[in-house]
Amino acid sequence: MDSILIRNFSIIAHIDHGKSTLADRLMELTGTVEKRNMKEQLLDKMDLEREKGITIKLAPVRMNYLGYELNLIDTPGHVDFSYEVSRSLQAVEGAILVVDATQGIQAQTLANVYLAINANLIIIPVINKIDLPAAGISNTTEEVISLLGVKKEDICLISAKNGQGVENLLSEIIKRIPPPKQTNSNLTRGLIFDSYYDDYRGVITYLRIFDGQIKKGDTLFMMATNTEAQALEVGVLNPNNLPTDKLTMGEIGYIVTNLKTTHEAKVGDTITLSSSKAKEPLPGYQDVKPFVYAGFFPTSNEQYQLLKEAIEKLSLSDSSLQYSNENSPVLGFGIRIGFLGLLHMDIVRERLEREYNLDLVVTNPSTDYIVTFTNGETKNVKSASELPDSSSVSEIKEPWVSGEIVLPSEYMGSVIKLIVSKRGQQTDISYVDKRALIGFNAPLANLLTDFYDQLKSLTSGFGSYNYELAGYRAEDLVRVDFLIAGEKVDSLSVIVHRTEAESLGRETVNKLKDIIPRQNFQVAIQAAIGVRIIAREDLSAYRKDVTTGLYGGDVSRKKKVLAKQKKGKTRMKRFGKVDIPAEAFSVMIKRD
């Protein structure tokens, strides 16, 4: 098709503002999917996406309307997948910004707006859910005008659920979003904005062609990974795969390759032809770096091999997953996995348990630290158990994030207190109509546990936040170990700031006291920094009355039996083993 008749656009929004529902209505109105084949969240293929009501994997689709070719990319809304969103926005000329009329501007709305502005996209603001009784259309309109500086008539009012105003939005897309720019280059360049592994066909890449064309049978070259591949099939998504002869400049489609893992066709990479390679890759590629780590252990060591195979299969489709073997004296063999964030971790855990029928113990999530030794060497440490003795360490750097919290202005005081309690620093305050926008910096490790829950609680559910990594800072960090019955449990160890170590130690031993079952002997639960004990709780022993069978006689008989029991309990305390339940290893995910 002539590129003048092509319109490429993405839908961006905060979680649960109606992106996928709007995509459904657009496909229905353009006749892309017959009404009898329609179902809610049609582009969300995974069961987890439907259950949680969120988009986890982006999905492109081609629609034809009034002679125009409309290429839509439905993007994820969560902060964990912001790199995928940024690559999708590089592949299009316009973005539909969806704002929920009942919730207004949220943190991820702002983050996605900044991404779209940086990509020089035409933004069409859309206020969704106008049919709901709680819809605050006038307030939300003021917020959008304040944020984007647009006129009131530039904002489209729709209800994606019942289709009200969606046809008018289609006309606005054709009118406002420009066609792809013409280039004179004969050298082929395409941007990969997603890729996944198909068990039967190999790696399938989703891409936008910027220069030249790609035909079936071409030998391709991935510029970032220096990998060659064959184009076994090229085509477009309608929304199912529809093979075509070729993909030309300005088009969005898919290529089935002979690659065996997505690590060879990464998101953001540039595809060119081996026979005539492009000189410069498309800008913006970066290696996706996980910054949340957790240990995954099977409840039975017999399942370790199954867990390893399951993670290997998942990593074929998810190039951001990084993993290594881990061994714990208490939990046995397991695997330490790196994730993009807590939601990413939660999704991987659920997929492993559902799709591969595994029973898992997941340890407390942590981040990575850069440790400098006294001899000048540096090491990247991903768990507290890897941190060596403090005498050989000269400096520990932890990751900090730069974030934004959007909330009604009346909750500002309590949220600033929350930021300070997490060792954070409030950097600025601004206003978008009646909402406050708080900028802050904070250590990532302190946001991993219950920060989101506390924010929602303090703001009656109205607060939302977004963050991005802002480098590493050297801090006074220490390793806190936990000892149960005198034995150190490496999987419970954490790296924390020295000022927080004592309070965290006390909190955690109190919680462990409630979780660990009582034994026939007294169990000491301790927190320690090196050899110094900073907190202790005792789990009292079960007491059996051994004197019940005695009657009459001298008191010395009673003393003799009690002394024998005391001697047995002392021996038990020396040799007895404490069985630690699985809940103990995730005790810090919810601290209070």
Image (cartoon, grey):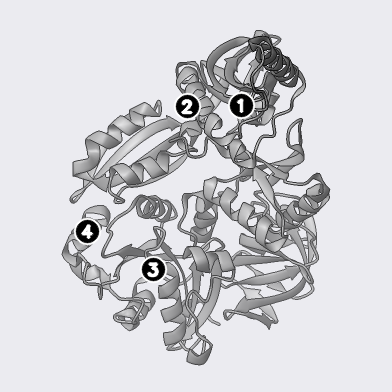
Q: SS for tag 2?
A: helix
Q: Is residue 69 left or right of residue 285?
A: left
Residue found 73% across the figure and 46% down from its top: 299
Q: As shown in the figure, which amino acid type bears the numbered disc 2?
A: Glu
Closest to the observer: 241 or 284? 241
Badge number at residue 145:
4
Q: As shown in the figure, which amino acid type bears the numbered disc 4?
A: Ile
Closest to the observer: 518 or 223? 518
Rendering coords of residue 70 (x, y %) = 48, 78
Q: Is residue 182 visible?
A: no
Rendering coords of residue 286 (x, y %) = 60, 45
Q: Dot 4, crowdedness within 10 Å: few (<14), some or many (≥20)?
A: some
Q: Earlier in the sequence, mark 4 or mark 2?
A: 4
**Residue occupied by mark 3:** 18
In the image, residue 144 above or below residue 511: below
Q: Dot 3, crowdedness within 10 Å: few (<14), some or many (≥20)?
A: many
Closest to the observer: 438 or 547? 547
Query: How far separated are the C-alphas under marks 4 and 2?
Result: 46 Å
Query: How far separated are the C-alphas under marks 1 and 3?
Result: 59 Å
**Residue occupied by mark 2:** 507
Q: SS for tag 4?
A: helix
Mark whose residue sits in front, 1 or 3: 1
Q: Are marks 2 and 1 in contact (CB under 8 Å)?
A: no
Mark whose residue sits in front, 3 or 4: 3
Rendering coords of residue 236 (x, y %) = 62, 77
Q: SS for tag 3?
A: loop
Q: Are marks 1 and 4 in contact (CB under 8 Å)?
A: no
**Residue occupied by mark 1:** 543
